[in-house]
Image (cartoon, helix red, strand yellow):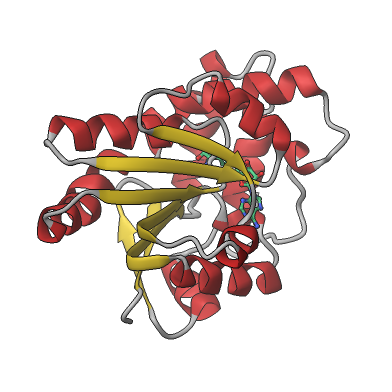
Amino acid sequence: MNLSVRDADVAELMDDPDCDPRRLAATLRRFDTVNRLISGWGAAYRSQLRPYLASLGAPARILDIGSGGGDLVLRLASLAARDGFDVRWVGVDPDPRAIAVARERTTSGVEFQCADAAALAAAGERFDVVVSNHVLHHLSAGELAVFAEQSLALSEGIVVHSDIRRSRLAYGLYTIGVTPFAPGTFLRTDGLRSIRRSYRVDELALALGDGWRVEAAAPYRVLAVGRADG
Ligand SMILES: C[S@@+](CC[C@H](N)C(=O)[O-])C[C@H]1O[C@@H](n2cnc3c(N)ncnc32)[C@H](O)[C@@H]1O
């Protein structure tokens, strides 16, 4: 597998509107385990969200765009609650099949809506923090520019987009590590295609342009951090 060049043409099975709905739902439910193992959001919470919430010193609203099965919202909500922060959480996803899975997990202070960033912006919504996980690599170049701009417009504070950082080692480790979690899901095929579609730090910095700080996060992660006051 040649990973020296980003493969923006390979399509993920879950992005097919006609994909098997049972496998899609199983995939969305199992993102919970995969995200806990690989997404690095514990560290991103400690380095980005926690200091910002502490500096705010007031109740906050946080948005996760492209929330999928909703597990990241619940995980961050639990981390923030443990630190004593008063936060209301909103997860949005344009795919109603994802929202149906996320709503299985709705809990107090957490809401899931079938919407995209443009709909929220049109409704005049603003949040203190906007995050996303594993969305950037799904988007075309044009979609990425719009998504980045809309995420900044929806935030009064910080924006943190987290995604996979493409590397041969990540590809090799995922190939082996996903085996116990893959049956009945798209996790093997889509995870490997995601790595092929994902960015290196310099590539994402170039694609996002000014106004974003793009950094490597361990292991095999890239973080794009923006500020509303930029
Ligand atoms: C790989 S899933 C990631 C889901 C979840 N964030 C996670 O980490 O498990 C990508 C999600 O992004 C959503 N998505 C795709 N394009 C989007 C867009 N332009 N705006 C918001 N969400 C989008 C898809 O519907 C899908 O649920």
User: Closer to the camera, 194 or 170?
Assistant: 194
Q: Residue at x 70, y 65 (%)?
A: 140
**Is the residue 217 above or below the residue 92 in the image?**
below
Direction right: furthest residue = 18
Residue at (55% x, 30% y) in the render:
69
Please identify the quarter of the rendering in which residue 30 is found: top right
Quadrant housing the C terminus: bottom left
Residue 82, percent across and down? 15, 30
Q: Residue at x 44, y 74 (%)?
A: 202
Q: Position of residue 64 (x, y in %)?
A: 46, 47
Horizontal relation, residue 227 to residue 113: left or right: left
Q: Position of residue 193 (x, y in %)?
A: 66, 44
Q: In front here: 140 or 170?
A: 140
Q: Is residue 48 left or right of residue 124?
A: left
* Image spot of residue 160 (x, y percent): 37, 59
The residue closer to the viewer here, 221 or 155, is 155
**Res 40 visible:** no
The residue located at (33%, 45%) in the rendering is 219
Instruction: Specify whether 109 is left or right of 164.
Output: left
Q: Is residue 199 above or below residue 172?
A: below
